[in-house]
Every structure is written in structure tokens, then in C-alpha cells.
Image: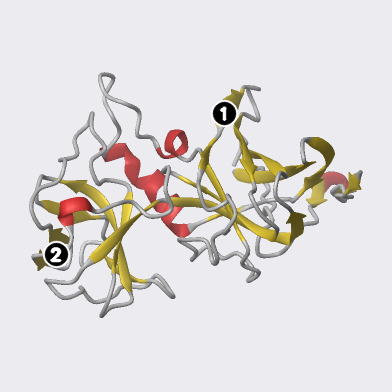
Amino acid sequence: MLNIYTPKPWIINLGRLGRMAFIFDRATNGALWYPGGLAYRSNLKASLFHKGKYEGTMDLGSGLVTNVGATALANEAGVLAGVSGAPIHTLHLANWHATGTGTTAASVLDFALQTPSGFGGQNPVAGTQSWINTMAVPKYQTVATIAYTGSEAVTEWCLITGSALTVAAGTGTPFTAVTATTFTVTGTVTASSTTVQGLQQLLVLPNVTTTTMGQIQSNTTTVATLVNNGATGWWTRAAQTAGSPPTGTEAYTLRPIFWDHKVFAAINVVSGDSIQFTYQLTVSSGG
């Protein structure tokens, strides 16, 4: 059996000043303490099944909600589906689990797996969603089991908003025109609306001459508008600071929103093994 010890927080009583909690977690991935309470905190557990036999559960600690995920959540007020349409809320869509073999520490700048799995984990699996409703500490939970068809060391996991790591651009690529805040597609695509997702809440990545990307806020059948700061909707991939628009005829790919990312010590799998991932996002009141 796997037995991973997760240290409990220390509570220090400061008399009239109240109590302070120290939470032990990786500095880059851990939750922060605030006088008013924790605003958001994610947690990931992995249960290994070796050829169908339960081997144990590891508490992998907190994940790392990304910049693109936070931007999607903040921006969705203007693009949510109406009651007659399929829900396109960020957390509703963030239900697809995938894994890889990258070993670089997770970063808020991440927007894709470092090295997608070659034996099953590269195919996102839809989770079973639930909402654990306690009044003060509600939790969003999604649970998915990924089956593996070969031997590899699983070291990273992500939660994304779509059923593929790369979304087919179809007849939309390449660009036919680009501005600081929009791009025009080849042919036509499905327009977004309050009841149809279209291209909204997807990332657009030019393929060749640039190292920028954009996050799509809405689109007509031919023109997509990017989430922007009033001046530009193109951002560098490396630092996610304001970048230059790509060329007007460049090919591009689309990706789902990369909501949460976790890199951890290797979980070795062989053909016939599976890992059940349980992800929880806690939203505490009082922050």
C-alpha cells in the first residue's frame, strides 16, 4: 500500500491578536494565509490501480490555477451561456483530466502539458462532477480515471476545459487578417453567443513566426475578438506580458483553457494500470 504523509497545519495562539495558521505546502503551489481566510485552494489526490487492484492513494497537495484559467473565470461574466444554451462556465467546462511526463515545476504561466503521455494520459478523460455544499466551505470536485496502455512515469496532471489537448481549427486556419485585438479566419466558423460557445474561452497560438498567444473572448463567423487590456490581446507565451500581433497569414492552433496543473513525484504505471484523480477546489468565505 502507498502511504503518503501530509503534514497538518500548525496553529499558533497569539493571545489578543488571535490565531495564525502555517500551512505546509510547496511555496509555488501552496495556498496563502490571509487574516480573512483562504479564498481559493485546490487539492489533488491520485489512487493507483495495478491491473485492477487498488494499491493506495496519494495526496499530491495543492495544484496551481493558471493565469489563463483565472482570466477565463474573471472574463466569463460577459460570455456565459443563457438558460437555453449548454453551460459554458469555466468551472463547468474544466472537467477534463490528462497527464504527462514533464518534470519542471508547475507555473502560473503554464498553458499546456510539458510532455503529454504516450500511453493513454494524452487523451483527456471527462470527470464526474459534484459540488460539496457546506455553507462556509463549498467545494467543486471532479473525479476521473485514466487507463494506461504502456509503461511510463506519470509526473504531471492537468485539468482543462475541453476533450482534446489541441482543438481542431478546421477551415479557420490560417489567419487572413490580424489586428491588436482581433483575428480573421479562413472561411467561416461557428459564431459564439450567449447560448453557443463557438471559439470563446479557447487559446489561439500562432504556429510559425511568433511566440505570442491570445485568449478568445467572442467571435462572429469570421472574426474573433481577444481578451485584452484595452491595447492588445496578444501576450508572450514565456512571460505573458503584452506582445506583438502575429502576421496576417500565419497558421494557428487552438487549445482549451488550461485551468490547473500539478507536477509531482513519479507514479510508475504499466499496461493495464489506471490512476483515479480526485480534484477539489475549495472556495472559502471570509476572504
- x and y percentages locating residue 72 in the rendered image: 38, 48
- x and y percentages locating residue 271 in the rendered image: 70, 49
Instruction: Name the foreground residue: 137 vs 49.
Output: 49
- x and y percentages locating residue 277 in the rendered image: 67, 41
Residue 181 can be seen in this image: yes
Q: Quadrant of residue 193?
A: top left
Residue plotted at (18% across, 71% down): 250
Q: How is the image coloured?
A: secondary structure
Q: Which residue is mark 1?
A: 128
Disc count in the image? 2
- x and y percentages locating residue 108 in the rendered image: 53, 62
Instruction: Name the foreground residue: 52 vs 102.
Output: 52
Question: How far is the residue under mark 1 from the one under mark 2?
Answer: 37 Å
Q: Is 200 left, or right, of 63 in this rendering?
A: left
Residue 283 can be seen in this image: no
Q: Dot 1: within a 10 Å radius of its alpha carbon, few (fewer than 14), some, or many (20 or more) residues?
A: few
> Residue most toward the bottom?
209
Q: Is residue 153 above or below residue 159?
A: below
Find residue 282 and name its label.
none
Which tag, 1 or 2, sits closer to the chain's start?
Answer: 1
For label 2, the SS is: loop
Residue plotted at (92% across, 43% down): 1
For label 1, the SS is: strand
Q: Quadrant of residue 47?
A: top right
Q: Which residue is mark 2?
A: 175
Q: Is 225 left, or right, of 123 in this rendering?
A: left
What kind of residue is marked 1? Thr
Q: Is 273 left, or right, of 107 in this rendering?
A: right
What kind of residue is marked 2? Phe
Q: Dot 2: within a 10 Å radius of its alpha carbon, few (fewer than 14), some, or many (20 or more) residues?
A: many
Quadrant of the image containing the C terminus:
top right
Residue plotted at (63% across, 63% down): 101
